[in-house]
Image (tube, rainbow, N blue to C red):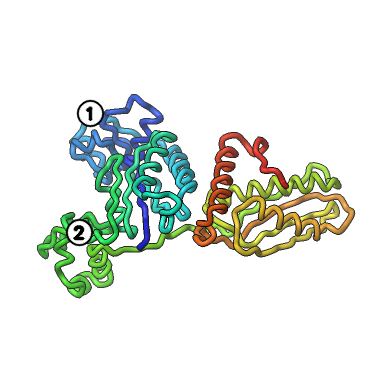
Amino acid sequence: MRTIFHLDLDAFFVSVERILDPSLEGKPVIVGGDPHGRGVVAACSYEARRFGLHSAMPIRTAFKLCPQGIYLHGHFKEYSRYSRAVKNILSGYAPVIEQASVDEFYMDFTGCRRMYGSMFELASHLQKKIWVKLSLPCSIGIGGNKTVAKIGSDCMKPMGITYILPGMEKEFLAPMPVETIPGVGKVTMRELNSKGIYKIDDITKLPSDYFAAAFGKYGIDLWLKANGEGSEYLTVEREQKSISKETTFGSDVVNKEIIYNTLFELTGKVCHSLRENNWQAATITIKLRYSDFQTITRSKTIKPSSDDDKVIFETALNMLKKAQTRRVAVRLIGIGLTKFNEFSEQEVLFEDIEIKRKKLLRAVDWLRRKYNYSIITMGAQ
Ligand SMILES: [Mg+2]
């Protein structure tokens, strides 16, 4: 049985707007632009929901129901900035994170009980941390798969935590309306209702064949979800195929110490991006260009892959020392990382020393973000 968390920021856009303008606190706030325009409600505060407003509602309808509301166009850049900040906090805890949308994150904490103790307490800690650091409220659902966790996070909003104990999935879902299941929209809901199926319980009482006949593959999936099953594995983005950085010296350099220090600094930067993405790299490439433009590249694949400055720097430095055979000034130095895998090699991860080091690296990343690179160097020992 896996342990999946679904963390959903409560009324996220509105929460950010309230950070930007605290006078919006306690008022019906609607993000979605011109109340007389053609748009839809992107988000609304709980105060606005009391007037019957909800997201995706045409904004004109919203205005009719709640003319006294405060209608905002929204600060979308700020939303992504806060979203990244949340992800950064979560990356310090969760070995694997799937960001499902700007305000939703799945995390896989399977096997982490020994490290974190109670999963409920871990959820409460994450919730508090996001609240204290960013003033953002969130709700968390904990379950054996993504579907159950997602439904859980929606149960007790705002600032709720719902833990669906292993084996209780079916009972938990039974009394809920069918449209609670993610993916069941209005059309499917009406179709199910027309067959006398209103609650999730009603689905489980029928055989899966019934849904296969009515909805095909989607129907089987629906039946499985109603029975408490769902995807257990997170999808982690991996579009970016490489991370690299290089420096061209202002004037060509002979001093090896300067060259090595530059390599160290570049390593710090690429490793930082690596960890921001929750990746580890297997292949390290260095690039060396002499003042006469002769260019040398060397690559090495390490096992296990790593996101550790020290490991990557040592490998890169060894390659550089071997590659730099000429007594000619150097014009450019670079490092590249490729062959990523997600930060999820649990065998390695859950060894305590490894965890401590990772926590340290994350703390270093945080400091680097807060101040700048020049202040924090780990010492190229
Ligand atoms: Mg949300």
Of 26 and 358, the residue lying toward us: 358
Q: Is residue 13 left or right of residue 301?
A: left
Q: In the rendered image of this protein, does residue 326 appear above or below residue 366?
A: below
Residue 136, percent from left and from top: 38, 37
Task: Give the mark nearest the N terminus, 2 or 1.
Answer: 1
Name the residue at 60% across, 39% down: 368
Q: Nearer the viewer, residue 116 or 145?
A: 116
Task: Residue 47: give x, y in percent of width and height.
Answer: 24, 33
Residue 68 - label: 1
Residue 292, given in percent of the width and then of the height, sits at 85, 54
| Residue annotated with mark 2 | 171
Residue visible at 75% across and 51% down in the picture: 333
Q: Look at the numbered disc 2 and give the secondary structure of its residue.
A: helix
The residue under label 2 is which amino acid type? Glu
Left or right of residue 281: residue 101: left
Specify the quadrant that holds the N terminus.
Answer: bottom left
Residue occupying the far top of the picture: 23
- Cα separation, mark 2 vs mark 1, equals 42 Å
Occupied quadrant, residue 34? top left
Other residues around mark 2 within 10 Å, as few (<14) / some (14–19) / many (≥20): some
Q: In the image shown, does 181 or 145 lie closer to the viewer? A: 145
